[in-house]
Amino acid sequence: MIRIRRQQTVTTRLRDAVLGARIPSGSRRSRRSRRKRRRRERELRAAVAQLDIPWARSAPARVLRENFMRLVMNPVLDHYAARGAAGTEQLSALKGPVILVANHASHMDTPVILSALPRRLRRHTAVAAAADYFYRNKAVASLVSLLFNTVPIERKGGGGLSKSSSHLDHLLDEGWSLLLYPEGTRSRGNGLGRVRRGAAVLAANHNLTIVPIRVTGTAEAMPPGQIWPKRLRGRLLSKRHRIEVTFGEPIPPLTDTAAMIERVQSYFENGDSGTSSLSPYRRRTKA
């Protein structure tokens, strides 16, 4: 009961901080309103940080997660999708934590990307997840944290990007890589959303490399609003979707965050021309 009340209190603080941070912009904004917004943003970051579940990054949790990926998630994904990967050679020379940034069109993106990562990188990668979506319920938050190593992030108020107090910064300082979806939400239709600068700010603050990732095919297999993947209809039998994960050339840390974001946006829109191999994921889980 105490844990439930704590979760409700933190969620309420998160909601109040988000609502309180929406202060109208314009020439009439006073110093007082700016101070109020900064205070609300600090409260927002504190509320999001309290939703984090550190035990999901413990050694037993990592072992359970790897076995879940191998015994459950990969067979399920293989039933619905013929998966391909390209550019994995871009990851072989990487050392230390990196910022992984991917376009986002489906809840299927996260398991598909994690499966494509080499085991040494996947075991130390946390996934930024929307606090207002995945952390409203304690049971759901615990489950996604355990199975996908998620960490909460506020996607509306810019929370989690302050170097002085962010739980994301602490994770990066501890050597964890971070998977971010810089569009902020799943894109609808065929168009990509605007890439936000949060990932570039983190990379610049911590002097980390950004690895852009382009995912195609997941929106058809599991579009927004659908809670489970579906196979393609065939004349006699259903068929699997084709899903491609492409890793782009790593982007070194730059002080010009706008230039970094421009390169990420360009990669999301144009991709690379590399070839891919079909369903290499199971073989690489032993790497």
Image: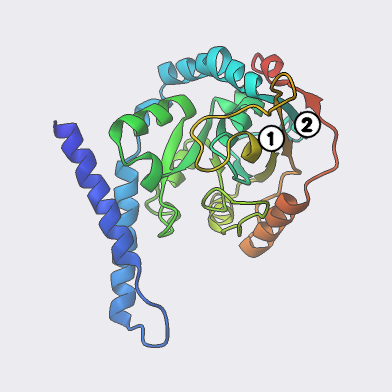
Mark 2 or mark 1: whose residue is earlier in sequence: 2
What residue sits right under mark 2 in the picture? 89
Q: Is residue 245 above or below residue 252?
A: above
Say which residue label 1 marks: 94
Residue 8 visible to an observer of this rendering: yes
Q: Residue sitting at 42 percent across and 58 percent down? A: 156
Left or right of residue 35, residue 208 in this image? right
> Mark 2 is on which residue type?
Glu
Tell me where residue 96 appears, x and y as whole percent: 60, 35
Q: Observer-nearest residue: 55 or 169?
A: 55
Q: Quadrant of the C terminus?
A: top right
Outermost residue toward the left in this view: 1
* Side of 122 where 18 appears, left or right: left
Mark 2–mark 1 distance (CA, rounded to whole Å): 10 Å
Q: Which residue is drawn at 68% across and 53% down?
A: 264
Q: Position of residue 207 (x, y in %)?
A: 59, 50
Helix, strand or loop for disc 2: helix
Q: Image quadrant of residue 108?
A: top right
- Residue furthest to the front: 235
| Percent x, y of residue 145 | 41, 30
Tell me if mark 1 has few (under 14), some (14-19) or many (20+) residues whose alpha carbon lies within 10 angstroms of its own: few
Q: In this view, does 267 lie to the left or right of 28?
A: right
For residue 167, say whether it is visible.
no
- Quarter of the view holding residue 143: top left
Q: Looking at the picture, does residue 166 appear above or below residue 3?
A: below
